[in-house]
Image (cartoon, rainbow, N blue to C red):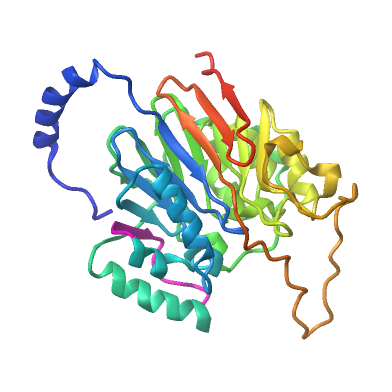
Amino acid sequence: MKIRIGVTCLLALAVLVVVPLAQNRPLRPLEVYVIDVEGGNAVLFATPNSESLLIDTGNSGTTRDVDRIMNAVNAAGLSSIDYLITTHYHGDHVGGVVELAARIPIRHFIDHGANVQPNAAVDKILQQYAEIYAKAGHAVAKPGDKIPLMGLDVRVLTSAGEAIKSNLPGGGRPNPLCASFKPKDPDMSENAQSVGTLITYGRFRVVHLGDLTWNKEFELMCPTNRIGTVDLFIVSHHGLNISNSEVLVHAVRPRVAIMNNGIRKGGMPDTMKVLYSAPGLEDLWQIHFPLLGGQEYAVPGVFIANPEQAPTVAVAPLVVPAPPPGTPPTPAPVHDGPANWIKVEAQPDGTFTVTNSRNGFAKLYAARAN
């Protein structure tokens, strides 16, 4: 990745000067904001050294999602975005990039390279995107690349349909779930191109795979689990059941999962079953109440950032029949009002706290035993 800067000596000098001072004051936690972009998967990382990484920018056609991202940026006290990863070129993931770049300086842009699923709306955005990153730093991510954020280890796991081949620290054990894996139809869409990352801060580990789909999860996790275990899993693909296979979710054994779903996008029963049965999972948090799962599969309301506003909620999942050929699907409910995020604050010893900004409910997760 062409985003490394040869300043090792300067950084070493800086450490000699800064460390004695840092020992006298508490270290700021790593802050992670899972932002409601109506079924996209925008996540902001604000580091203890005041650097930042944003993954995805939400939908186009409105300033709603960028407004919500900027609310999180301001809450984190940031004046710029150091790295922006666009996982793939679907409108709910790349749509806000032009508007966001007009609001705040973005220093480095990272993506998977050429678009494999052209369409008129996205092509226009990508043309403007290319004009923007031409004036800043830009890199095409390759599996195994490291994104240089001070104090964090940010590794690219997947990009452009490829996955890492080498084991990361903590990984390398055989994955017994590979033997029972059942592949689905090949995915030729942008989803399979997703840039997936593992972010490590001391002993705290979080994985974000964008919309990586079922068969690509197998390629990442088999025959060996190259990642190891994680503390936090940002649920893939809004909680759709063409992602989030047992071969991934059960193997990485997350303690907490956060699902960035929409009102009627994601949170599907099959995915909820995989998550609920994941070994070691303590809690699932959700950005929205999932109509596609209904009360049968929803977590308790205290873990949901934006509940459904209807006066009653059916226990059974909402069944949305496929429309007749040639007709568009029924549009999802619109949620343009105030939105809440889910925030994670992590310490280098592996301790972390998850907070629902809607109700202030927070839960502390003690560090895992070695």
- Mainly helix, strand or loop, the magenta region? loop
Horizontal side, residue 274 vs residue 231: left or right:
right
State yes or no: residue 115 in magenta: yes
**Residue at the image point whose x is 88% and y is 51% from the top:** 312
Horizontal side, residue 188 vs residue 47: left or right:
right
State yes or no: residue 210 in magenta: no
Residue 167 visible at all: no
Residue 259 visible at all: yes
Looking at the picture, how far across and down is residue 341, in whole percent?
A: 56, 45
Towards the viewer: 87 or 317: 317
Numbered circles on residues, count? 0
Q: Quadrant of residue 366?
A: top right
Looking at the picture, how far across and down is residue 167, in whole percent?
A: 44, 35
**Residue at the image point whose x is 23% and y is 21% from the top:** 22
Q: Which range of residues does the magenta coloring cover?
A: 104-118
Looking at the picture, how far across and down is residue 239, in whole percent?
A: 68, 50
**Residue at the image point whose x is 43% and y is 59% from the top:** 86
Looking at the picture, how far across and down is residue 102, in whole percent?
A: 34, 67
Q: Quadrant of residue 144?
A: top left
Q: Is residue 185 above or below residue 41?
A: below
